[in-house]
Image: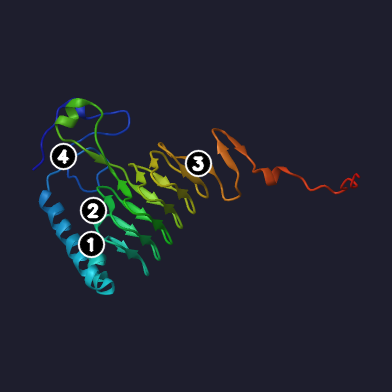
């Protein structure tokens, strides 16, 4: 069943608003399939129960729950999803306990990633205007993590965010905008604070570490007595 909406819902500065099927939509929609969410919750519960008995034997259930699962991944339950089928996890990635991955839009996790406990990957978003929220409209924007990304415990990744290869997000950070590759980012909202060479990011400036600023002395002074 699709509800009709009035004209004021059709546009917003960031999104095109419409009423249509919820799944994987980047336009705001009205959820109409609670039975599907319940079915995926039951499958996630079956995976958790099977994992507790035999993690290897539970792997087929994880493959059924997710859209794609690479070789050698480990996902420790409980795992909470909207659909599961919109989630891709690359090879050799480790996911710790209590991942919440609301995959109304696609969630892509690269290879060799480390996902700490209690991480939230949240693709759904809602209108800022009061009346569209009362009409229960929502949209979703995809989330993408590159290869070798490490999310510390309790990190929240907001809709539409991409995190580049090799980047690290400090525990408890809230990621509201894209993070480039090869940086460490922390805070709420998360901002890059350093790169792998130890260069410290301060707003628009980049400071080299003290060791990099110190030049070796080619002609050391003689020892004074």
- Identify the residue position indicated by label 1 in the image: 65
How far apart, in angstroms, are the residues tagged by discs 2 and 4?
Answer: 18 Å
Instruction: Tell me which numbered mark, 2 or 1, is placed earlier along the sequence.
Output: 1
Badge 2 local density, few (<14 within 10 Å), some, or many (20+)? Answer: many
The residues tagged by marks 4 and 3 sit, at their Cα atoms, a distance apart of: 36 Å
- Residue 224 is situated, as x and y percent measured from the top left of the image, at 90, 44
Sequence order check, earlier mark of 4 and 3: 4
Kindly report which numbered mark, 2 or 4, lies closer to the viewer in this rendering. Answer: 2
- How many residues crowd around disc 1 within 10 Å: few (fewer than 14), some, or many (20 or more)? many
Identify the disc placed on residue 30. 4
Q: CA distance from mark 2 to mark 3?
A: 29 Å
> Along the polypeptide, which appears first: circle 1 or circle 3?
1
| Between marks 4 and 1 in the image, the one whose residue lies nearer the viewer | 1
Q: Residue at x 23, y 65 (%)?
A: 64
Look at 49% across and 54% down and name the residue there: 166
Q: In the rendering, which numbered label is found on residue 81?
A: 2
Query: Residue 219, how many percent across, how many down?
Result: 88, 48
Q: Secondary structure at mark 3?
A: strand
Name the residue carrying label 3. Answer: 192
Of label 2 and label 3, which has the lower sequence position? 2
């Amino acid at each position: 069943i699709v509800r009709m909406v009035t004209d004021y819902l059709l546009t917003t500065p960031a999104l095109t608003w419409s009423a249509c099927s919820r799944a994987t939509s980047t336009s705001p929609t009205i959820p109409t399939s609670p039975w599907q969410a319940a079915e995926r919750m039951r499958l996630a519960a079956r995976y958790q129960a099977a994992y507790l008995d035999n993690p290897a034997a539970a792997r087929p259930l994880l493959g059924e729950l997710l859209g794609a699962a690479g070789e050698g991944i480990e996902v420790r339950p409980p795992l909470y999803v909207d659909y599961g089928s919109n989630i891709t996890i690359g090879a050799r990635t480790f996911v710790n306990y209590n991942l919440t991955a609301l995959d109304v839009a696609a969630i892509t996790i690269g290879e060799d990633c480390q996902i700490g406990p209690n991480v939230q990957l949240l693709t759904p978003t809602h209108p800022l205007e009061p009346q569209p929220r009362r009409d229960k409209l929502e949209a979703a924007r995809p989330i993408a993590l590159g290869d070798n990304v490490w999310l510390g415990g309790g990190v929240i990744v907001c809709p539409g965010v991409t995190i580049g290869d090799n980047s690290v997000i400090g525990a408890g950070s809230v990621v509201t905008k894209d993070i480039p590759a090869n940086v460490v980012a922390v805070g709420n909202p998360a901002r890059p604070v350093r790169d792998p060479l130890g260069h410290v990011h301060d707003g628009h400036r980049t400071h080299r570490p003290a060791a990099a600023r110190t030049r070796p002395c080619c002609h050391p002074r003689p020892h004074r007595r």
